[in-house]
Amino acid sequence: MNASHAPAPAAVDLPRAYRLLNHGPTVLVSAAHGGRRNLMAAAWSVPLDFDPPKIAVVIDKSTYTRELVEASGSFALSVPCRALARATMAVGSVSGRDLADRDKFEACAVAAFAGPVLGLPLVGGCVGWMECRVVSEPRNEARYDLFIGEVVSALADPRVFTDGRWHFDEGQQELRTIHYIAGGRFFEIGEAFDAN
Amino acid sequence: MNASHAPAPAAVDLPRAYRLLNHGPTVLVSAAHGGRRNLMAAAWSVPLDFDPPKIAVVIDKSTYTRELVEASGSFALSVPCRALARATMAVGSVSGRDLADRDKFEACAVAAFAGPVLGLPLVGGCVGWMECRVVSEPRNEARYDLFIGEVVSALADPRVFTDGRWHFDEGQQELRTIHYIAGGRFFEIGEAFDAN
């Protein structure tokens, strides 16, 4: 699961971008503004529309990431896999505000690469990524901490997402998406099956 | 997996109700008004708040369920398990409007029982349930098909949800939550693990 062995992220057709979130994974939210960047973990995200693709994510008022989202008008979602579970807990357990001179990517030893459209910091070692422009909805943001984003780029790890679908084989446990329970405990996504 | 062998649904403390959705399962949305009832499948739901608990779900304008939600000001979510995957596809593939004299529960051979607070039709054989009062947000409903609900009752199957958490054992594959991919294909939720 060495990131240096991972293939380059592959573009996902935008009308299929919702598929990255359709099965309910926990995500990492990242943002950058004025030379600062940050990231946080979020179990609460949801697709909202297909084309143009929109998603929604809950970003608490107390977070430093939110400050950067509000200042920049954009955010990115990265979909972590089991290999990133410990890092997901780590970035969800400390505020970027408390790190003084370091940023949280460095403090948590999380790699980043620049998103193709907005240049947002995407999290290395994840299996899916999207860059979003905030669709301004001040009432939702204030009352529900709910941010709506239009997805302007989407990428996925071609080992586990091709033709617009996730597919995890037996040997790919470390690449499976993770779904938060509570108290540091996750489910990995399980077996795929046809219902018809 | 005979429903007659299932234990009675157990109450979930309301501040833990979000846990029913936290790991991103596909849900069934049901509603009733004026002697009619209906249900639909929805992959797009998300917790919004802890206490009082709120959730959000996307309910398309074209659905009959939405008509009943708007008329009644309430809806229920049921969390189907693998045993209900075929039924989930079935209720997601036909509109209650096209069924003339029958309702979709009967047409799809889906059992229902009355929710404890609002009397809404909850789907038998599922593993989690919540009744919600609509928190009116006309702009979200019109622009994003997004409905916010305050959760007023929550129940779960005590075989797989106790002490505020899902837990699925080896032998409980048919009770695992399902997470929609596309084209009639789902993931079941997989193994739980500690990230710390």
Image (cartoon, coloured by chain):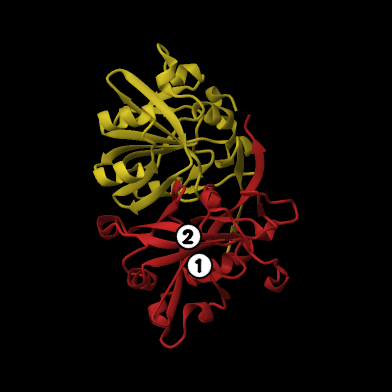
Chain colours: A red, B yellow
| Chain containing the residue with disc 1 | A
Residue type highlighted by circle 2:
Val
**Mark 2–mark 1 contact, CB under 8 Å?**
yes
Image coordinates for residue B172, horizontal then vertical, percent? 62, 38
Q: Secondary structure at mark 1?
A: loop
Can the viewer see residue B78? yes
Q: Nearer the viewer, residue B2 or B182?
A: B182
Outermost residue on the bottom side: it is A101
- Asked if residue B196 can be seen in this view, the reply is no
Label 2: state its secondary structure: strand
Residue under label 2, please give it.
A152
- Left or right, A87 with respect to B29, comes to right
Q: Is residue A90 above or below residue B44?
A: below
Q: Quadrant of the C terminus of chain B?
A: bottom right
| Residue linked to disc 1 | A117
Furthest residue in direction right, as rendered? A171
Residue at point 42%, 17% (across, down): B103
Which dot marks residue A158?
Answer: none
> On the image, which quarter does residue B193 sit in?
bottom right
In front here: B75 or A47?
A47
Few, some or many C-alpha atoms within 10 Å of disc 2 (few <14, some 14-19, many ≥20)? some
The image shows a total of numbered marks equal to 2
State whether residue A171 is above or below residue B32.
below
Q: Quadrant of residue A175?
A: bottom right
Chain under callout 2: A
B36 relative to B183, above or below: above
Q: Earlier in the sequence, mark 2 or mark 1?
A: 1
- In front of the other: A64 or A148: A148
Please say if B88 is above or below A59.
above
